[in-house]
Amino acid sequence: MHILIATDAWLPQVNGVVQSLLNMSRAAEAHGATFTFITPQLFKTLPMPTYPDIRISLVTSGMIGKLIEKSGAEFIHIATEGPIGLATRRYCLKSKRPYTTSYHTRFPEYIAARAPFPMNWTYALLRRFHNGGIGTFVSTMSVENELKARGFNRIMRWSRGVDRSLFHPRPGVPKSTKPIFLYVGRVAVEKNIEAFLKLDLPGTKIVVGDGPARKTLEAQYGNAKFLGVKSGEDLAQIYASADVFCFPSRTDTFGIVLLEALASGLPVAAFPVPGPLDVIGGTNAGYLSENLQEACLKALQIPRQFALDLANTYTWDNSARQFLDNLQNARRSGTLALPAAPVETVSG
């Protein structure tokens, strides 16, 4: 299988989309798959307003078409709804080439957190984008049910994995004042980090990551430690030094950091929303509550082995198999669909 993946999210960005594509493709190569990536590295880019770490590609469907034809790929997968994703979709529809998509980010909720833009409008645009393909990959049952209720179709499940050779408990790791409550991820308003930072908790709060809200939050919450972006062994050591992983986001579709924390032996504290509900709900590996302080304190009492047991059920090999199976099933059962007119289903 030769698969072309078009994505607006790529290195040097550090986020769940990039990590999902990199780790899945590496694991899929063991099953005979090869990949061509169309990424912002191939085009001129401009910094995104208010978020310069994200680059906006200056690209046309004609430019994308030449890359697709040159690649000779059998399957086309569009990972994001940005300029590269839009241009790839336009080319596929014009040339009647089937394609699949994945839904990584709850953009309507992200946008609503920054500006008074009706979520129904954003969902209508996303529905039109995804329903033109032969399959839309989502990470969890909660997201699948939500999108089906909003008129999305041809939905297929694609879960995630974790590298347990990197993320695992490390006895004897130096620790700050105990207990340690940890957040890892982008430092931006849509991640709801302030809900974590304002909690009255014992010990130490640590924030790993960077983003447009970091300076403001760092100045406002001087009792927390902001360590910036960490990766590899440095990040794994930080996970291993903590006692509870706090995940305050209400907008993530999954949260790979949840798996990294679990594999490091950290119970999770989070709100009972999609992502945490799908990964942690119904298990003993964390505590979900609308009272995040209660969740953090309850999670502190959970044995670390429960987190490790849950992490063992997630592998990148399984994720890759699921991705490849989805491509084959979508090709067998689907035909290229012209975008349907927006429909009103669920209010925002």
Image (cartoon, grey):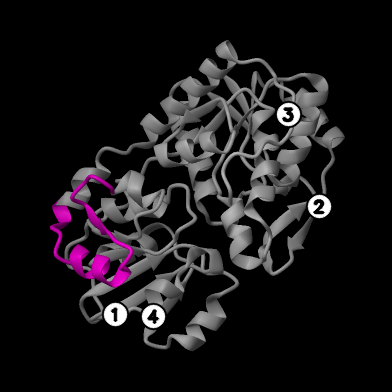
Check whether the beta carbons of the residues at disc 4 and disc 2 lie within 8 A of each other.
no
Query: Magenta part of the protein: which range?
Result: 281-305
For marks 3 and 4, the one nearer the N-term is 4
Point out the tag, 2 or 1, that comes first from the N-terminus: 2
Q: Quadrant of residue 42?
A: top right
How far, Cα to Cα, is label 4 from label 1?
Answer: 12 Å
> Relative to residue 24, is residue 163 depicted above or below?
below
Can you identify the residue that label 4 sits on?
Answer: 198
| Cα distance in 3D space between marks 4 and 2 | 41 Å
Give the distance between the C-alpha atoms of the residues marked 2 and 3, in whole angstroms. 29 Å
Closer-to-camera residue (106/13): 106
- Local packing at callout 3 (Cα closer than 10 Å; few below 14, some 14-19, many 20+) is some
Direction from residue 138 to residue 95 in the image, left or right: right
Inspect this view and state whether residue 37 appears: no
Residue 335 percent location from the top left of the image: 66, 15
Query: How crowded is the residue under tag 1: few (<14 C-alpha within 10 Å), some, or many (20+)?
Result: some
Q: Amino acid at mark 3?
A: Pro
Left or right, 287 with respect to 64, comes to left
The residue under label 1 is: 204
The mark closer to the camera, 4 or 1, is 4
Pick the residue in front: 258 or 233. 258
The residue shown at (39%, 54%) is 257
Pick whichever of labels 4 and 2 is earlier in the sequence. Answer: 2
Would you say the residues marked 4 and 1 are in contact, meaning their CB atoms lie under 8 Å apart?
Answer: no
**Amino acid type shown at disc 1:** Thr
Q: Which residue is mark 3?
A: 339
Q: Quadrant of residue 97?
A: top right
Residue 44 — which label?
Answer: 2
Residue at horizontal 56 percent and vertical 12 percent from the top: 333
Quarter of the rendering occupied by the N terminus: top right
